[in-house]
Amino acid sequence: MRTFVAALIAAMLVESCATKPPAASTSTATQPSPMSPTQQLVPVPAVVELTANSAFAITSDTIIRVPAGDSRLLAIGRFLADLIGLSASAEPLRAEAETGEAGPGAVHLQIGEVQESGDEAYELTIAPERVTIKGRTAAGVFYGVQTFRQLLPPFIEHEAVRLDKNRPVRAPAGRIVDSPRFEWRGAMLDVARHFLSVDEVKRYIDLMALHKLNRLHLHLADDQGWRIEIKSWPNLTAHGGTTEVGGGPGGFYSQQQYSSLVTYAQERFITIVPEIDMPGHTNAALASYAELNCTGKAPVLYTGIDVGFSALCVDKEITYEFIDDVVREIGAVTPGRYFHVGGDEVKTLTPAQYTQFIERVQTIVQTRGKQMIGWDEIAPAKLLPTSIVQHWRPKTTPKEAVTKGAKVIMSPADRAYLDMKYDTSTPIGLNWAAFIDVRRAYDWDPAAAAEGVPESAILGVEAPLWTETVGNIRDAEFLAFPRLAALAEVAWSRTERRNWDDFKGRLAGQAPRWTALGMNFHRSPDIPWRVHVD
Ligand code: NGO
């Protein structure tokens, strides 16, 4: 009876919500019609069957049920309870042996078979009496929770939200079955040009998780700064971490702080990929240790934005001892399988010196139990089939690496670089590769982006944010959003589900949630943004 009444009230509420006059738009475009549930979803799922005619209502009595003994699902349950303001209730989470037949008013998190293939697939079923979020693995359940989250009203994103019996939180009834197109759905933060604090990086991780991204590549060293503690080479941070572009104070992560980022990311199913750029982009290291220079003399710290002038001394043995220490220490605090060695823009070495260096570093990385990744300049080196090339130069192709069996991450600078300006009026950012408006970031197919690189060789997509002009997380959010959401859809959603006009509408629907999250997103004039509508 209680369920029936609740369902009836929920249905009436959904109905009344749907007949409310549309909210005013911030853009000059014509007034958008009321939002359909599907318009709340980015990236778009594979199969969506939702109705605005009935709904599940979350109240302070709602319980989240997880299988007993599954600590990962318990953690996801806690994440969901925090998100929807259930943490304040007496006992929001119940672990139980049988999750199938529990009573009404519950959200069930389960491991089980789903109709889509792959480890990250999930199935979300919302009925008036219960919600089931099922994944083949915990990662799938986590993504199902993110989709469920996007179907809830944006006000839940406010930190202080508390459930109120008189104001149920409703999710439209229906079913979603989903899985990602690519396994690598990445973002990169350059914390070397401008340092970002642990809390700022955690914030970026949170925003990535909302969009089902699963790799955070941290560019931890460049000419302007060394940002991670290396116990066997302490001057790297003591000296090399003390400044940044423009001469600010810089900073670095202790290994313990880095580990806290790794854990925070892991809890959101994101793998941290550390990068130490070499042999170029190394002025901060060269300034910290004279013996790494061929001249034996340390240069001064650098705070400009030129590239290509620095290189480790590839003919000295101590260089390889240094690299081995760095890979060993960072590798030991990085559970993920990858180590990125940079390899970009070396202008002071011969091609032979360069490829020999990369091949030797590849052996070090392999010996330390990691898979090597490098920017696309590494393609001519003798690569192991496990090595990965990150394509970034729009006019080149890493096809020779593909013939050696290497996989490719697609980050073409004229589509995926978040540090490019949106247009000529963008106050920060660069424009050497292109102006990248939202459509340009969205409307491309990774499988057609580099000649000779077929879809089977593509691991996925990554959006780098270089920080020459980015001073803090507010700037980062401004350049990243909405384009990172566009690139998340490029990486997650299959081609036949993607369409610019449809995406524009769904992106517009993110504005209330992003506003509730306090995000500093770029209000691109191309998008008919919605204002708060709950
Ligand atoms: C290039 C360069 C970086 C710059 C970035 C700016 C790569 C791989 N190397 O991308 O050092 O910061 O452009 O857009």
Image (cartoon, helix red, strand yellow):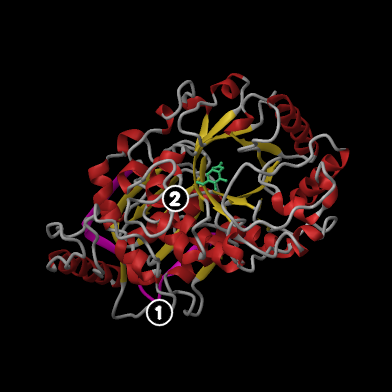
Label 2 – label 1 distance at C-alpha: 42 Å
**Horizontal side, residue 71 vs residue 466: left or right:** right
Query: Can you give x and y, in whole percent of width and height, for residue 115 in the image?
Result: 42, 38
Q: Which residue is mark 2?
A: 430
Which residue bears the numbered disc 1? 162
Question: Crowdedness of circle 2 by 10 Å Cα count: few (<14), some, many (20+)?
Answer: some
Q: Is mark 2 within 8 Å of ligand 1?
A: yes
Q: Nearer the viewer, residue 33 or 331?
A: 331
Residue closer to the observer: 157 or 85: 157
Label 2 or label 1, whichever comes before in sequence order: 1
Which of 131/314 is in front? Answer: 314
* Amino acid type, residue under disc 1 in the picture: Arg
Nearest to viewer (mark 2 / mark 1) = 2
Q: What residue do we see at 41% from left, 45% from top?
A: 487
Residue 67 is covered by the magenta coloring: yes
Q: Is residue 410 left or right of residue 357?
A: left
What segment is highlighted magenta in the picture?
47-69
In the image, residue 161 lies at what x, y percent? 40, 77
